[in-house]
Image: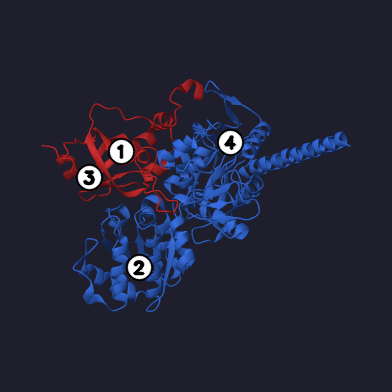
Chain colours: A blue, B red
């Protein structure tokens, strides 16, 4: 009799939907059906129990082929590589649990390396803006129950967060919004007429890279300088700006969601900075919140865990040994790669080979590359050592942080293939091995010193 | 008469790319979803590009051959889009404006007809870029 598991968490995007229903075979080994998840989340669950999984670590041989090795041998290889490296970098963590992120911090603290997460290539500028200008945010539950105006700026949730609109923002029947979408006004700002723009009440087709100007125009309205706005700003007519600004001002509870359209383009953190300033301005008149559309289901978790560990959410430089240091542009993965400062790259819970600009991949691959990932990703394809692990959120339980920074306990759906380890166990195994090797080094030095002393006497 | 024009490139997620990525980056679905450039019809006709034919996309930092299609999510003239992934990242500039984030969107590219060129697979592109092109599929499997 197949088992039905209710309220399972989805390991895909920052929506971290925890209402997924999964049907598992009698023996608990095969996922048969997935309900409530989006098309992408469903695919993650269904692929998890496919037959072509790699279940043991593999080491690249001089002729290019792979050799299967044990986890212990993999720990030894990774530990020695970290000790030998002058500046090792561990990057990823969007698809890992908080428990693994905590263990990674221990590992790179011992290994004196750089620790970075996927925010470094997505919402890093948002975090910089939060430092500079605050983050007047709310939870997605408040959005569902209260919001009457939803503004998506540089975000395309139909494609990137497929259940965001149906579960939290537009369509759900909220406590104070019992009629769902008919009580909400949707505004989309995007240079493309995306599918999300297609369902919006207002679509502002901003000129690419000119978002900051449009923000400024809205702020001018808030401060009563409408007359000084030019006839067109960033290819948006003045009349449209005034009309939309009127809706923003009249909102009872407005929520401003922003995405990669602001953080990947010219301006970066300055775009988010002014978005937060606009939110603050709007709060003088009505009630507004702002929220980043986080990509991976637990990239926010990495920011949280490292903030409470070190005070910084990403781009952590632990090479000094006695204190942490963060300076995007200097300690960020892409910049470190561009300057060729990294001599060991460890990819975990992401696919840097597919999602970094190819120049950065080229630089990183000049040195040893270790990938810790359940899948045969591009990062695994180019690796010198590939350590497969259980899939977080499917085979490995743990805590994840949703895009609104609400922690959720994810449960296990099926067991990992026999003999496999979780990413937390792998990171812990490497850290333990480094401690043993360093202790051996210290013992060796002490023994040597003793022999020299005896010899001198 | 074809014209050389500079377009503004946007590389972002699409649901087709997301689903295909979970099937595997060596899958046919991922290749079909990500090795395409979406363009405005007017731009295609001005540049002498026929739909569903290969084109060479060149930016300040590299180039890639992909298949041209009309924008599925409507694009104004002057804007083009490659879904995020291996093909897009062959042309994404590494410059980060000191934030750590590369210029994934809003950078200039030129697009040229290349009807006789081959669109390479994800693995071929990456292996060639990092000097692993000599490793055969049989050894890597």
Disc 2 versus disc 1: distance between alpha carbons? Answer: 36 Å
Q: Are marks 4 and 1 on the same chain?
A: no
Q: Earlier in the sequence, mark 2 or mark 4?
A: 2
Is the residue marked by circle 2 packed among few (<14), some (14-19), or many (20+) residues within 10 Å?
Answer: many
Label 3 chain ID: B
In the image, residue B126 lies at what x, y percent? 42, 32
Mark 3–mark 1 distance (CA, rounded to whole Å): 18 Å
Q: CA distance from mark 4 to mark 1?
A: 31 Å
Residues marked 2 and 4 touching at CB (< 8 Å): no
As drawn, the label of residue A388 is 4
Q: Secondary structure at mark 1?
A: strand
Say whether residue A297 is left or right of residue B33: right
Pair 3/2: label in front: 3
Q: Are marks 2 and 1 in contact (CB under 8 Å)?
A: no
- Of badges 3 and 1, nearer the viewer stands 3
Residue density around tag 1, few if under 14, some if 14–19, many if 20 or more, within 10 Å: many
Residue that numbered label 1 is attached to: B36
- Callouts 2 and 1 on one subunit: no
Which residue corresponds to mark 2?
Answer: A184
Report the Cα–Cα distance between label 2 and label 4.
45 Å
Disc 3 to disc 2, C-alpha distance: 39 Å
Which residue corresponds to mark 3? B6
Residue pictured at 41% horizontal, 59% vertical: A269
Residue A105 percent location from the top left of the image = 62, 50
Q: Residues within 10 Å of mark 3 (few under 14, many from 20)?
A: some
Q: Residue at x 55, y 44 (%)?
A: A89
The answer to which of A179 and B111 lies nearer the viewer is: B111
From the viewer's perspective, is residue A450 above or below residue A170? above
The local secondary structure at tag 4 comes to loop
């Amino acid at each position: 009799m197949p088992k039905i598991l209710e309220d399972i968490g989805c390991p895909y995007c920052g929506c971290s939907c925890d209402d997924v229903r999964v049907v598992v075979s009698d023996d608990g080994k095969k996922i048969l059906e997935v309900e409530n998840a989006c098309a992408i989340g469903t695919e993650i669950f269904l692929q998890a129990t496919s037959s072509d999984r790699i279940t043991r670590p593999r080491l690249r041989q001089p002729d290019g082929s792979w050799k299967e090795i044990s986890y212990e041998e993999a720990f030894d290889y990774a530990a020695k590589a970290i000790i030998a490296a002058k500046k090792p970098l561990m990057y990823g963590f969007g698809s890992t649990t908080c428990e693994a992120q905590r263990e990674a911090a221990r590992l790179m603290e011992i290994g004196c390396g750089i620790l970075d997460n996927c925010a470094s290539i997505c919402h890093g500028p948002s975090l910089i803006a939060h430092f500079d200008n605050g983050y007047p945010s709310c939870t997605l539950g408040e959005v569902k129950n209260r919001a009457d105006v939803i503004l998506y700026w540089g975000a395309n949730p139909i494609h990137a967060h497929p259940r965001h609109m149906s579960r939290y923002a537009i369509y759900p029947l909220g406590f104070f919004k019992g009629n769902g979408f008919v009580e909400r006004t949707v505004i989309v700002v995007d240079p493309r007429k995306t599918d999300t723009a297609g369902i919006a009440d207002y679509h502002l087709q901003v000129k690419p890279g000119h978002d900051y100007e449009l923000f400024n125009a809205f702020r001018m309205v808030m401060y009563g300088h409408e007359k000084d706005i030019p006839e067109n700003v960033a290819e948006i007519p003045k009349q449209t700006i005034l009309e939309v600004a009127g809706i923003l001002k009249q909102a009872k509870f407005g929520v401003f969601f922003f995405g990669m359209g602001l953080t990947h383009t010219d301006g970066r953190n300055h775009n988010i900075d002014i978005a937060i300033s606009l939110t603050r301005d709007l709060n003088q008149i009505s009630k507004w919140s702002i929220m980043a559309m986080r990509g991976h289901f637990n990239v926010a978790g990495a920011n949280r865990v490292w903030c409470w560990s070190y005070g910084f959410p990403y781009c952590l430089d632990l090479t000094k040994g006695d204190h942490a240091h963060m300076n995007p542009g200097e300690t960020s993965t892409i910049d470190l790669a561009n300057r060729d400062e990294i001599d060991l790259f460890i990819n975990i819970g992401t696919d840097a080979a597919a999602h970094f600009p190819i120049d950065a991949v080229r630089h990183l691959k000049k040195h040893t590359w270790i990938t810790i990932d359940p899948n045969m990703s591009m990062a695994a394809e180019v690796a010198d050592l590939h350590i497969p692990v259980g899939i977080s959120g499917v085979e490995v339980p743990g805590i994840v942080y949703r895009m609104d920074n609400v922690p959720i306990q994810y449960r296990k759906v099926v067991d990992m293939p026999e003999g496999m380890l979780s990413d937390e166990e792998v990171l812990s195994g490497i850290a333990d091995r480094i401690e043993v090797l360093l202790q051996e080094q210290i013992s060796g030095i002490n023994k040597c010193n003793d022999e020299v002393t005896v010899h001198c006497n | 008469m074809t014209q050389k024009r500079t377009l503004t490139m946007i590389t972002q997620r699409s649901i087709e790319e997301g689903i295909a990525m979970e099937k595997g980056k060596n899958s046919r679905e991922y290749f079909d979803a990500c090795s395409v450039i979406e363009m405005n019809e007017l731009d295609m006709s001005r540049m002498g590009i026929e739909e569903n034919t290969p084109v060479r996309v060149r930016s300040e930092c590299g180039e890639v051959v992909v298949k041209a299609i009309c924008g599925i999510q409507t694009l104004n003239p002057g804007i083009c889009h490659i879904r995020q992934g291996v093909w897009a990242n062959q042309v994404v500039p590494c410059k980060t404006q000191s934030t750590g984030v590369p210029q994934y969107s809003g950078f200039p590219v030129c697009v040229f007809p290349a009807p006789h060129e081959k669109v390479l697979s994800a693995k071929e592109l990456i292996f060639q870029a990092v000097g692993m092109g000599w490793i055969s599929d049989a050894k890597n499997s």
